[in-house]
Every structure is written in C-alpha cells, then in structure tokens.
Amino acid sequence: MGSFSSASEALAAPGLDTIDVVLLDYDLGEEQGTLFVERAAHHGFRGRVLMVTAGMNDGVMLRTLDSGSSGIFLKHSPPGRLVEAIHRVMAGEVWLDPAATRSVIAAATGRSESEARLKGLTPREQTVLKGVFEGLTNKEIGAGMEISESSVKAVLQQLFEKTGVRTRSQLVRIALEKHSSEWFSTPS
C-alpha cells in the first residue's frame, strides 16, 4: 500500500481495509504510533499491527498490546528477527521481542522494569559507569580501578543487562534520563 508519515495520514488512506499487516513506528514525531492502533478499527482496518520501536516504557508496551497491536519489535534487533516477527504476526500469533518481555511482565504485574532490574549499582558498577561518562576507554577505566580490561568489559555487560541497552551511548542516556540521582550518589 505505501508508507505514511503520520497515523492520521495512514488512517485516511483509501484501501485501508485491504491491508494485512502494518509495520508501525511508535515514534512518529508529533504523533505516537499508538494513535493508529487505537483508531484503526473505526476506519475499517482489520489487519494486524507490528509496532516497531527503539524503546518505550513498560506501561506503554502493555497498553499497545492491550489496544490491539499484534506485537512489538525492537529496532536494534537483527533484521532476520523482523522477518520472523512479520511471519508470526501474519499467522495470527502475538510477537513480543525477547528484550521487551520483562517490561511487559513488569507492567502487567504492577512493578516497573527499573524496579525489577535495578536494585541499585554496586560500587564497582558505579565506578565503571563514571569512567564511561568521563569518556575513558575500558583500558583506562581498568587502570584507574586496578582491574583488567576484561573485568571492565564484564562489568559493562552487567550494566547493559541491568538497563536493557546494547551500547555505551545508550547506557549513558538511560543513566542520565532515569537514574542519575540513585546511581551517582556516594554510598555512606
């Protein structure tokens, strides 16, 4: 059918009732993709929606699925996984990116993902994170802490797992946006 830059534009498109699946970006600039999901049925759409996102909070993920989306695919996942997600959604299954599973469960049980994953950082994790903030390499962080570079990498992997990110820049962003007060406080 085509591509659209807003949910409103897609909802107004002729032939909407003939579409089988929509790959829908969550962030559409001024609108969120959830607007399409919420209004699609009223516009004759009976197909499936696979929400594609770089990330959304726990509650939005749950509401997206609850309001009729057939799945959530995270943009940083491998392209082969997108093909699999499309096939499964087309077969009538619900697709939930493995990395998003914790978030949806946390939202459904009333616990935020950050509460479930982030019981605070260990002093070693705080020191490594501060080194990342200072722009130091793993080798420089290790030298300052008197640990090996591979130990620094292991701590970074722990931080990535706790935050659900894959890169240093994503780690910095999530730490600044959500956890700066708790992660950078000096233990007493």
Image: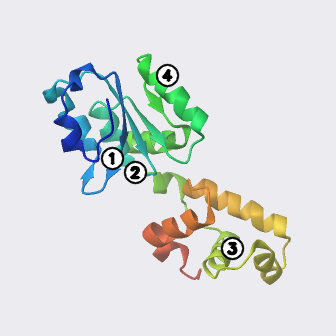
82 left or right of 159? Answer: left
Which mark's residue is nearer the viewer, 2 or 4?
Answer: 4
- What's the CA distance linking mark 3 and mark 4? 41 Å
Secondary structure, mark 2, is loop
Secondary structure, mark 3, is helix
Residue extending farthest to the top is: 91
Residue position marked by numbered label 3 in the rendering: 128
Residue 80 figure quarter: top right
- What's the CA distance linking mark 2 and mark 3? 26 Å
Which mark's residue is nearer the viewer, 2 or 3?
Answer: 2
Secondary structure, mark 4, is helix
137 left or right of 94? Answer: right
Q: Do residues under tags 2 and 1 come within 8 Å of each other at their CB atoms?
A: yes
Numbered label attached to residue 56: 2
Q: Residue 35 location, x and y as percent?
A: 22, 43
N-term-proximal mark, 2 vs 4? 2
N-term-proximal mark, 3 vs 4? 4
Q: Amino acid at mark 4?
A: His
Q: Residue 81 location, x and y as percent?
A: 57, 33
N-term-proximal mark, 4 vs 1? 1
How dense is the environment of label 1, judged by Cα within 10 Å: few (below 14), some, or many (20 and up)? Answer: some
- What's the CA distance linking mark 3 and mark 1? 31 Å
Q: Nearer the viewer, residue 41 or 104?
A: 41
Residue position marked by numbered label 1 in the rendering: 60
Can residue 16 be seen from the camera position used here? yes
N-term-proximal mark, 2 vs 3? 2
Q: Nearer the viewer, residue 122 or 131?
A: 131
Can residue 120 be seen from the camera position used here? no
Q: Residue at x 42, y 40 (%)?
A: 104
Q: Residue at x 54, y 54 (%)?
A: 117
Secondary structure, mark 1, is helix
- What's the CA distance linking mark 2 and mark 4? 23 Å
